[in-house]
Image (cartoon, coloured by chain):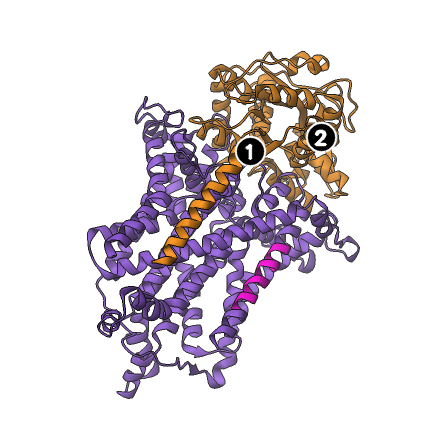
Amino acid sequence: MSRALNGFILLALLLLVALPLLFIVLQALFPYFGEGSWRGAFSAFPALLDDPQLASMWLGTLKIGGGVALCSLLLGLPLGALRGLFRLPGAALWDLLFLIPFLTPPYIVALSWTLALQRNGYIEQLTGINFDSLLFSSSGMIGVMTLNIFPVVYFAVSRSLLASGQRLAWVARVHGASAWRGFWYITLPLTLPALAGGVLLAFTLAIEEYGVPAALGAQAKLTLMTVGIETKLADWPIDLPGAASLSLMLSLVALTAWLLQRKLTGSSDVTAVGGKPVTQELAHAGRLQNLMLLPFAVTVLLAVVLPLGAMTLSGLLNTLSGGLHLSNLTLRHFGALFSQQGDALAAFSTSIGLALGAALLTGALGFLIAWRVSEGKTRLLAMMDGLALLPAAMPGVVVGVGLILLWNRGFWPVSPYNTMFILLLSYSCLLLPWPVRYVSSALRQLAPTLEPAARVHGASRLQALRLVVLPLVAPSLLAAMMMVFAVASRELVTSLLLAPAGTQTVAIFIWRQFEQGSVGQGMAMATLTLFASLSLMLAATVLMRRQAR
Amino acid sequence: MPSLKSVKTGAISAMILTSAIMINDAQALTVYTAGPGSLSKSLAAGFEKQTGIKVNIFQATTGKVMARLEAEQANPQADVLISASWDTAEDLQQRGWLQPFESANAAKVPDQFKTANYVAQGISALGIVWNTQSNTPEPKTWQDLTAPAFKDKVTTPDPALSGASLDLLIGLQNSEGEKAWQLFDQLKANGMVMSGPNAQAVTPVLQGAKAAVFGAVDYVTYNNIAQGESVKVIFPENGTVVAPRPMMILKSSQHADDAKKFVDYVLSDEGQEQVAKAWLMPARTDIKAQRPLFTEIKLLPTNQDGSSERSAVLKRFGALFGQ
């Protein structure tokens, strides 16, 4: 049974991750691979190493990735700890609000910040102050990206605390430790795998990100690797081998980070869920409650209200050059969305369907992978773990090219290429790391005795998995699936490359509006989809809660 | 494991279903196109109405279209390609990817915009996009943007991301030699910044963060003006370049006859009127446009010989405005 399962997982990983990656490696090594020829092996590398920008791209990417990871830690850890330890009013609402950065395409967020902060932007029109020089700098880029990415740390930490509870810390309290000592010596170390996983994900997300560096980088005089890769694919002649080898380098950075994280947290024992589940008792914040809500409110203001406000406003302005005046407000951009022969609506339903599919697929597969990996320390399982994380390090555009190279071949009897399935494959490939990370950190807190205990009492392996393991990691899994849904519903880069002729997703629709200079129209679509998907997720949360009762 | 089995059955039946869709779709004409989405859509709709042939459009930037074309080499999908950069057509012809076709409707297209293998769909030009409310004097020449009034107020598209913008640099270099590079130096000294592709350079000018774009594609801005934005397209007195949009049929096409019909349609009266409606210049001289035509714009000499010149210019400009 477990061998069959291993086989199934390996097959899935092979199709989703390994094969596209292999085809990219082949493209990097054999420049004419795309046309099916093996000639000119390795000829792409000298030109690549000759690139005068290579060193600065490396440095810039590491600087931004490290900066975002650090800032996400500084922001996500305290917020996540508060959420996971205390009974906060509106807890579910804060969670939902922190999902919003994922629902918004990063290039839209960057553009919204630009429209708000740049010279003569909304802030200056309202207050007379502009933040032009802050925005277009590496700190500005780190700031904007952190506000977009920090929720991965927040969710990792808070879910892990919610799952493990604080019974162990209370044992310490009973034995005379102060609340702070209990947190520092017991609770925090227990969340370490989740924390490390979250920070790692933040780092890889930051180095893989394209939208923000593309929107702010040029003026900040900072070229990151993703932008470098995109540039190689942007102007004629297209440098496919160059882009492929540059992406391999980028994947190596992420792989190194993953190895480092494995080394750091691999050996510690963080078992916290050992027996009968008890109802979670969250601490009462008492008089400090309002004080604790303050950082949440400030973060929501910065990460959600400001960019969202700028976005909505841009969709409501008749003309950008008209500025902020009551007479310049209009609903025509929103109205136009409904009159474009149903295009906007079709794009919306396509995106939602694909996002739902990706969430279910990566959720199921990610859970299985994390569960198998948590059970043993064999080399095969470590390889699975590594493979499942790898896509987080690959720029979307490269996954896209890899999927074309792989699937657009005459020798496949059936190919997903040129159908919606290719988009589902690409989203699932790119987002698989999320459920794997979240579930495996949750699994590490489960005592290894739980499952055997169920088996001893006569449960089959599948029953034990379904009735014991799954419910215990469900909060983490669901959080990850929500994030997959959110990210997939607005994914741009691979969609642009892979969408079958004649199909649009939300992000493609918006991108095309921008390309044609219709900023208002694009922003209106972004606003509308954001609120629509948010209400969908809200409804799902309410439904699930009702079912749980 | 019944659940896994049912998933498998589901997946297999879904695959059969989509391959059925694909077979059905194989009858359709596939057009890869850069540029105005509304235009490609209305062309496809008009063509379908006239001939009953279904058209699948893949529309993106020239770079994305070409990247997909290149990655698909092993099993080409596109029948017709419309790019925004004349160079791409020349290069594909040298590679032997194109199928010769001269449409009867191309008779009224000037010789410089057609060859035996490809023909312009429409033409855009590059100009200065200037915000009329920016409290700066209206620029008349490229040099005007080096004046103190425009200090830190000029932006330009990244020529590595915008083929048309690179054409302008090459045009200026061809006509003025080193003087062109002096101009770029002065622009740099005056605080001009390079930003993303075309739209990304224009948006700050709309909002007033910048006053002018050095070398923007005109039709996008005409569209903005039609929407009520207070900007103006200026074609400098000392000359600019046009960017014809080549349309070609790929040799690998399985639907060559339909592809020829499509090219005929785009060059027909009806097709060209739709091109004009998208604020481009029609390729045919006998179709009216709602904007200045290339005959009314002073043009810089164009002599593009090979890609070595392009990459040299790109490298030098990148070094000047990059880090």
Position of A16 with respect to B309 (left or right) is left
Q: Chain of mark 1?
A: B
Residue A328 visible (yes or no): yes
- Based on the displayed image, in which of its 4 quarters is residue A243 positioned? top left
- On what subunit does the disc labeled 2 rest? B
Label 2: element kind: helix
Q: Residue at x 62, y 32 (%)?
A: B35
Name the residue tied to disc 1. B25
* Front in this rendered view, residue B265 or A330: B265
> Is residue A539 in the magenta section?
yes
The answer to which of B322 and A110 lies nearer the viewer is A110
Which residue is identified by label 2? B49
Q: Is residue B310 magenta?
A: no
Residue sitting nearer the eye, B83 or B232:
B83
Q: In which image quadrant can residue A539 be found? A: bottom right
Q: Position of residue A16 (x, y in %)?
A: 37, 45
Residue B204, position as x, y percentages in the image = 64, 44
Q: Earlier in the sequence, mark 2 or mark 1?
A: 1
- Horizontal side, residue B28 vs residue A272: left or right: right
Determine contact: label 2, label 1, CB under 8 Å.
no
- Residue B72 image position (x, y, % from top left): 45, 29
> In the rendered picture, chain A carries what hue?
purple
In the displayed structure, B226 sits above or below B244; it is: below
**Amino acid marked by disc 2:** Lys
Please, what is the three-letter code of the amino acid marked with disc 1? Asp
| Mark carried by residue B14 | none
Q: Main secondary structure of the magenta part?
A: helix
Q: Residues within 10 Å of mark 2 (few under 14, many from 20)?
A: few
- Report how far apart the C-alphas of labels 2 and 1 lie in the structure: 17 Å
Residue drawn 51% across the image and 24% down it? B313
Q: Which chain is rendered orange in the image?
A: B
> Magenta region: which residues?
A528-541
